[in-house]
Amino acid sequence: MKRSLTAGFLALLLGVQANLALAKPADGHDWDYLQPDRDQVIASLNVVELLKRHHYNKPPLNDARSAKIFDSYIKMLDPSRSYFTAGDLAEFEAWRNEFDNFLKNGNLEPGFAIYKVHLERLQSRLEYALGLLGNGVDSFDFTLDEELLIDRENAAWPKDEKELDDLWRKRVKDEVLRLKITGKEPKAIEELLTKRYKNQLSRLEQTRGEDVFQTYINAFAQSYDPHTQYLSPDNAENFDINMSLSLEGIGAVLQNDNEYVKVVRLVPAGPAEKSKQIAPADKIVGVGQEDEEMVDVIGWRLDEVVKLIRGPKGSVVRLEVIPASNAPNDQSSKIVAITREAVKLEEQEALARVLNLQQDGRDYKLGVIEIPAFYLDFKAFRAGDEDYKSTTRDVKKLLTELKQENVDGVVIDLRNNGGGSLQEATELTGLFIDQGPTVLVRNSDGRVDVLADEQMGAFYKGPLAVLVNRLSASASEIFAGAMQDYHRALIVGGQTFGKGTVQTVQPLNHGELKLTLAKFYRVSGQSTQHQGVIPDISYPAEVDTKEIGESALPEALPW
């Protein structure tokens, strides 16, 4: 909105806090210590200004944006609509079109106030669940004909505490039933669920102001697009900001999915991929160290789960995983033991092999080059080391070897290749085309930079195919798209990820901001954003494309 915060809204803010005090039980936790500090206020103003000046779309911070921020924040706090009541939402609704003003003025109080209500409701629900379990799991009547809506993303908000109680009674009952089906005894079920809820209560009491600030500012930042993200000082230091939160140690990229932590992708040649026991969209529900007791992590924050999974090189971490391949509503899990190790550059090197085939009575030799990532030793490259390693250099050597083998054709395997160096995607394209543009980059100011192969002649001119799947992303899509646009190769496999945007990292006075400032375009002028690369010959996807890919992310920029 155009006007600044009025006395009426100040009164509303105070009113919500007063209602909290009235609703708080005698032994309730006091959340008043959660207050925004000066560094967070300055950081929020910096984020507002950076998005205004440099985001690719440069959308205005107005009433419409405020409504998006409001909806995003509520969804982040209560994605299953199981904590807030309709009455809570009615009070919050008065702020729906005010967050633009709050952010422009550096007023973080409303965001903190809503978060405190969330903490109070969460505490109340956990205590209620523990009360139910205190009566014993045998107190649940499984002869009743009852229904529980599992996917509550679009469900009506519970009217009041009575409806919340009924929802949570069914919810706890459902968890008991699921555990019974897996063969657990009543006492073991009671102990597991009691421990889970008590652990969640304990972690609730450790909530920091930084937790509130990061959630609130990300509701704002990610209303622009899913790759624009605020990182607190801790997260900026510890996590790989290029692809959500990356876990050193097991080689996996994870994200929150309601109360679960879900695997987004596996790092090529990493321990998780080598185990062959974890796949994208699997849910991690437990983490154990070596032979220690498994820790139930349902309901935990992503950064908390990350801390449990990370550890010294060579040590073993055990993960309890619900496979994505399970039937709907099948919550049975398996235990996967993984030895932590760093992903070595040499293990991500391009590799080649020769397949001997027969077709119509004739023998053929097919060269296959597997490229796990688009890598470049930047340090050696910048130092002028003539022997620096890169994808293009390695592939060129492999092509030379395959030529000596007199192969009849070459297949470039980019399946599960999540991308990497843009420079390498451009240079690799140059090995297979005569000369010309490889990719176009359009900046937020409308300027288009053309990256091109300026070297005359193609290094390999023989028959070529490129294998891709849903996990082929970014640089992989640039290369595959160029091969398709130049009619240089046959693209085979599944629709690719669809990430056609460029991000940069801006340091703040407090943390960092990763923001989207440009967009890739193929040589044909088409964007890979959302759509990805559509193969010439399609094969069924191994993963659910509705769950994995750019199109599965909220607020993804359009094609």
Image (tube, rainbow, N blue to C red):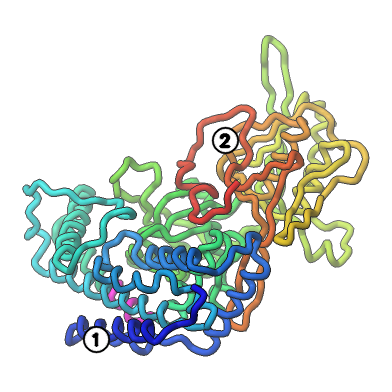
Examine the image and state in which quarter residue 241 appears: bottom right
Q: Which residue is identified by label 2? A: 494
Examine the image and state in which quarter residue 138 appears: bottom left
Nearer to us in this view, 80 or 426: 80
Nearer to us in this view, 313 or 433: 433
- Using the rendered image of the protein, determine whether residue 305 is visible from the camera's viewpoint: no
Magenta range: 200-207
**Residue 15 in the figure: left or right of residue 34:** left
State yes or no: residue 205 in magenta. Answer: yes
Residue drawn at x 33%, y 63% is: 298
Residue drawn at x 73%, y 54% is: 442
Nearer to us in this view, 23 or 467: 23
Q: Position of residue 500 (x, y in %)?
A: 64, 50
Nearer to us in this view, 489 or 68: 68
**Residue 477 in the figure: left or right of residue 402:** left
Residue drawn at x 63%, y 39% is: 533
Q: Position of residue 140 (x, y in %)?
A: 9, 57
